[in-house]
Amino acid sequence: MHTPAITGTGVFTPENTISNAELVAAFNAYVDLYNADHAADIAAGRLAAKEYSSEEFILKASGIQQRYVIDKSGILDPHVMHPLLEQRADEAPSLMAEMGLDAARKALAEAGKTATDVDLVICAASNMERAYPAVAIEIQELLGVQGFAFDMNVACSSATFGIQAAADMIRSGSIRGALVINPEICSAHLEWRDRDCHFIFGDVATATFIERAKAASGAFFEVKSTRCATVFSNNIRNNNGYLRRSRPAGMADRRDMQFMQNGRKVFKEVLPMVSDHIAAHMAAEGVAADDLKRLWLHQANKTMNDFIGRKVLSRTPKAHEQPNILQDYANTSSAGSIIAFSKYSSDLTEGDTGLICSFGAGYSVGSVVLQRHG
């Protein structure tokens, strides 16, 4: 049996940002266009007029102040309201592979390793650019990795589920090292015309390199334990799968082909599920609340994270104990907790214990107990 360890992480951040002010201006311009185009139906009561968004509403609802995106021109055009992403030739690297490659190289560099140290590549994300061939195999090819690769989709928990799969294979001895890569182009599946969710997501890619602890060339985080759970729910859903049918002539766009959620039910059902999951995982590993130096949570919503932090620690967490990157990156699905870990873990010292947790559609929740060495 081998001890799995995280020895490197990498984050690819797009160049474009959209502030709440920019987003609200574009959304409200779209509202004016929509209400003018449907004025007769609105006046007759057949349609409800769309309401304006506001910076105050977004900040209060989410804690988000800005987000990074691959393309902002289409999102901020009230006549378009979605990113304009280039359709690439089959011979060209896909966008997800390109983003994932950047993050993977950074993770390997931090670990002091090369492609020859990698036996497995997992591309774990909430939405894949295509059904097949696997994006992970494309990244494997671009990196020059021997071995094998596969895609994994567990929505916002994809990264922690990927870490569990890789850690288990390292522990068993079937592989030496693995890259778990999370390229999240969340802007492409968000409905930017929906006031209730138009502010939620951003784009990013993260990568985590996991290897046998004895092979680490510097400080590392031992993967002490992993735990995953799923419970089926329709309260977070996107029906835009590869079996999508073309809509009949005259049928309006189907709203369910983009991100949808019943926010109130998600809050009510997910919060106790995640809090209980973390508590049970910590208890099984003999980790008391006072032993936990850092909590790297999924970056979905500040109110949710504040609630979970209080439940786990039985008090209000200090800022350094539960770092948030939500205000800068918005919700980046599976990548959020890994961004927080990558940016806020180097200050921990020998023996310090931390926990990564992600949660989302499924419902799904995954947690990883880590201990710093070196």
Image (tube, rainbow, N blue to C red):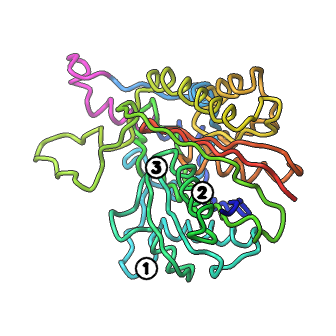
For this view, does 111 lie left or right of residue 244?
Answer: right
Image quadrant in which the N terminus is located: bottom right
The residue to which callout 1 is attached is 92
The stretch drawn in magenta includes residue 40: yes
From mark 2 to mark 3, how far is it between C-alphas? 11 Å
Label 3 neighbour load within 10 Å: few <14, some 14-19, many 20+: many
Label 2 neighbour load within 10 Å: few <14, some 14-19, many 20+: few
The residue mark sitting in front, 1 or 2, is: 1
Q: Which amino acid does label 3 sit on?
A: Ile
- The location of residue 152, given as percent across then percent down, is 45, 57
* Above or below, 264 relative to 220: above
Q: Which residue lies furthest to the front in this view?
A: 1
Q: What residue type is labelled 2?
A: Asn
Image quadrant in which the C terminus is located: bottom right
Magenta segment: 28-48
**Proximity of marks 3 and 1: CB atoms separated by less than 8 Å:** no
Residue 173 image-quadrant placement? bottom right
The residue to which callout 3 is attached is 75
Label 1 neighbour load within 10 Å: few <14, some 14-19, many 20+: few
> Tag on residue 16?
2
Q: Nearer the viewer, residue 6 or 214?
A: 214
